Amino acid sequence: MSEIEVRLAALGLTLPPPFTVPSGLSLPFELIQVYGTRVLISGHGPQGADGLMAAPFGKVGAELSVSEGYQAARLVALSMLASLNRTIGNLDRVDRWHRVFGMVNSAPGFTQQPSVINGFSDLILELYGPERGAHTRSAVGMAELPFNIPVEIEGELSLRP
Amino acid sequence: MSEIEVRLAALGLTLPPPFTVPSGLSLPFELIQVYGTRVLISGHGPQGADGLMAAPFGKVGAELSVSEGYQAARLVALSMLASLNRTIGNLDRVDRWHRVFGMVNSAPGFTQQPSVINGFSDLILELYGPERGAHTRSAVGMAELPFNIPVEIEGELSLRP
Amino acid sequence: MSEIEVRLAALGLTLPPPFTVPSGLSLPFELIQVYGTRVLISGHGPQGADGLMAAPFGKVGAELSVSEGYQAARLVALSMLASLNRTIGNLDRVDRWHRVFGMVNSAPGFTQQPSVINGFSDLILELYGPERGAHTRSAVGMAELPFNIPVEIEGELSLRP
């Protein structure tokens, strides 16, 4: 069991199973790409323990509160870590988180995107610590997101050489 | 003639000429940047065989159907490949597609961005195959795009060492 | 004094002090990350000489004109250069600008995002010249941005080896 999985278990958190693609939909891309020590990460949404996209759906500032948006961003982190774990085999192989691009499905006039994406950043920092977990970030407001998910995040990191 | 150009010809597809910048507009950036083996690709829109931005314009889910959005994303791929070809000289030099960031000009309530950006991904995979063509991706909904184009895509790839 | 600082002074421009985070807000990320020679840059907004976010706030095409948006994008460049200078110590260490992702808080129907982000690109090119300053770019319209800032830009560059 990796050190990161030990920390996840200590927090009472579980990584979700592979995403169940809605029937009739084609998603012709890789969730994770490893190229040398670079790891590129596709946009992930909040995912439940059943493998499906997790409720609530809608826009933060309307259907979701900031606090619900924060929880959704935390679920995005778990979905991304699950994809990573399936591809790289051991979450301890991460050397450094680099880039986090946080997209919030935003109701008109909603401008607290950073407080939402903190749900992602706080968990990554708690798991990886202030050196490996530190990352650059943008947290911005989208007009719409696929399936009406409230948060989508893409990113990049490096593996240990 | 490169292998990729042979495949394009077999599909009946032609790469467009350089983009005709609208008069009075300054676009002070590179469409493609090569840095070592890394290739960074600016946001591209749908372009016609005449070098101009291609109709239809507007938001997917309002002025454009999903199927018209898919075709627009396919035209974005051709525009990007044309820019690449002019810069790197031979499209076979691509070792691996890495990152595709697909932005869909989205009408309120339109949430099928992945089905639109598939027009790009499907063509890249058809041309480059499942290993070199595989890429990470986000497909998200923008409030507005320049010139009211329906789709804009930026990306990154690597050249063969 | 670095060559870039000499050029800034010749233009009558000053780099702002560190950003004053609004009270009660947590921003758990790095403004700049250096990883080998790669430099990743978080989303920056317009910042004033007092360290606060700079007015005007709102959407370009409504509260701001294109020309005010251009000035805001220029202030983003100064904020980013100030962050860079604090992290890398000397702005002359930049070997090449790579990627600029320009996000414009856009009023409905506003489609002149490139003319806004030119305020950033023009200054970077003026300071770094056409070779080191050249960059790839997207300039797109967001539904909302944090704190209702009109422009946010993230990017990437490389340091001299």
Image (spheres, coloured by chain):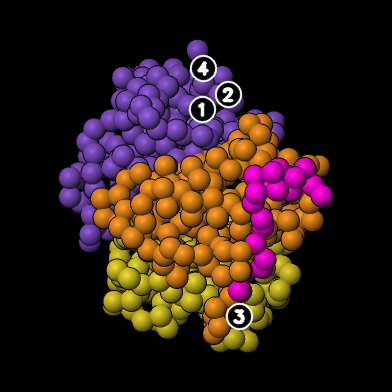
Chain colours: A orange, B yellow, C purple
Residue at the disc numbered 3: B8
- Residue A20 image position (x, y, % from top left): 61, 74
Q: Amino acid at mark 1?
A: Leu
Identify residue type, mark 3: Leu
Same chain under badges 4 and 3? The reply is: no
Q: Residue at x 35, y 27 (%)?
A: C23
Residue A50, placed above or below residue A44: below
Instruction: Tell me the SS state at disc 3.
Output: helix
Q: Secondary structure at mark 2?
A: helix
Question: On the picture, is C94 further left or further right than B46?
Answer: right
Which image quarter holds the C terminus of chain A?
top right
Q: Residues within 10 Å of mark 4 (few under 14, many from 20)?
A: few
Q: Which residue is mark 1?
A: C84
Which chain is mark 2 on? C
The rendered magenta stretch, by its main secondary structure, is classed as: loop
The residue beneath circle 2 is: C88
Residue named by callout 4: C2
Q: Which circle, 4 or 1, is nearer the viewer?
A: 1
Task: Inspect the magenta stretch and tell me whether residue A15 lies in it.
Answer: yes
